[in-house]
């Protein structure tokens, strides 16, 4: 039987009909198997809706696959725009891992918002959008498609020595890898003590973590995210945004 005290939604089935399945398997005989109650948060529209989680994982996986193929294709033809799909692939992998690590090591807090696709606020989305726009604008200004009236009559002096592209991009990949590994290790070590939302009061079951990566850094997740973000800008070649 279902919990009569639990909230219900019109037109939505909150109970999995195990009795009907049992009758179908064993004939039409009477079945005493009670239906399995499904909490409303796991139903479509809930913050832990399995349908919402699956569609976001599907979209991120598709974005990762398509962007990876485009990156390889553009890099093979020596097209500088390979950085754009590579950036999208890195973002897709990051957001998927945010949910995956939460679901593995802190399942009680795993929800749709654990993907961090929209729960980071408008500033987070604006930052990544600005980074992509800087790359596309720079590529357009220095390409053969640039209108003559946009050409600068002088050269902008460089304050720092120019480094080979391979060094800059390689450094970006290293920083992203190290940053992602440190952040994932922090989530794995902290387990239920990790939270994507800043906590203003201490929970009764909270424990101060001092082992693993927390033995070397008090906030390894922030540390990892900072260097991961810096690595993405080196990958894009964004001197101004960095």
Image (cartoon, rainbow, N blue to C red):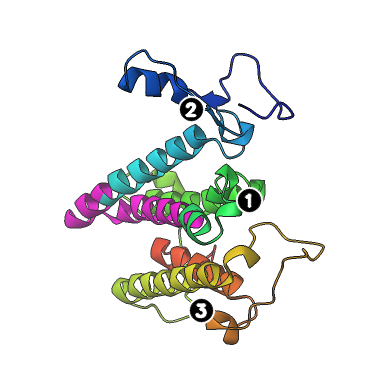
- Quadrant of the drawing holding the N terminus: top right
Q: Position of residue 72 (x, y in %)?
A: 22, 54
Mark 3 vs mark 1: which is more N-terminal? 1
The mark lying in front, picked from 1 and 2, is 2
Q: Disc 2, disc 3: CB below 8 Å?
A: no
Q: Secondary structure at mark 3?
A: loop
Provide the residue designation for mark 1: 120
Q: Nearer the viewer, residue 209 or 222?
A: 209
Tell me how far mark 2 sits from mark 3, CA to CA: 75 Å
Residue 183, given in percent of the width and then of the height, sits at: 51, 69
Q: Is residue 106 above or below residue 62?
A: below
Q: Are marks 3 and 1 in contact (CB under 8 Å)?
A: no
* Residue picked out by circle 2: 33
Front residue (pair 16, 22) = 22
Q: Is residue 74 magenta?
A: yes
Which numbered marker is on residue 159?
3
| Residue that appears at 33% across and 73% down | 170
Determine whether 99 is above or below 57 in the image: below
Query: Which range is magenta?
Result: 69-98
Residue 180 in the image, given as x and y percentages of width and height:
45, 68
Is the Cβ of the residue at disc 1 closer than 8 Å to that at disc 2? Answer: no
């Amino acid at each position: 039987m279902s919990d009569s005290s639990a909230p219900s939604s019109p037109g939505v089935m909150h109970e999995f009909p195990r009795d009907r399945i049992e009758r179908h398997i064993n004939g039409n005989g009477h079945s005493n198997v009670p239906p399995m109650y499904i909490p409303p948060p796991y139903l479509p529209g809930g913050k832990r809706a399995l349908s919402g989680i699956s569609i976001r994982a599907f979209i991120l996986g598709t974005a990762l696959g398509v962007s990876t193929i485009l990156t390889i294709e553009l890099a093979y033809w020596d097209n500088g725009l390979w950085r754009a799909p590579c950036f999208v692939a890195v973002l897709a992998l990051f957001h998927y891992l945010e949910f995956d690590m939460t679901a593995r090591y802190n399942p009680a807090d795993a929800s749709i918002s654990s993907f961090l696709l929209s729960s980071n606020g408008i500033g987070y989305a604006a930052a990544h959008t600005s980074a992509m726009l800087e790359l596309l604008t720079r590529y357009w200004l220095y390409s053969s498609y640039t209108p003559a009236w946009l050409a600068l009559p002088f050269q902008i002096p460089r304050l720092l020595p120019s480094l080979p592209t391979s060094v800059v991009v390689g450094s970006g990949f290293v920083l992203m890898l190290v940053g992602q590994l440190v952040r994932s290790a922090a989530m794995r070590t902290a387990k239920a003590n990790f939270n994507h939302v800043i906590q203003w009061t201490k929970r009764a079951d909270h424990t101060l973590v001092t082992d693993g990566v927390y033995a070397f850094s008090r906030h390894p997740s922030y540390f990892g995210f900072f260097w991961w973000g810096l690595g993405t800008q080196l990958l894009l070649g964004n001197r101004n945004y960095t």
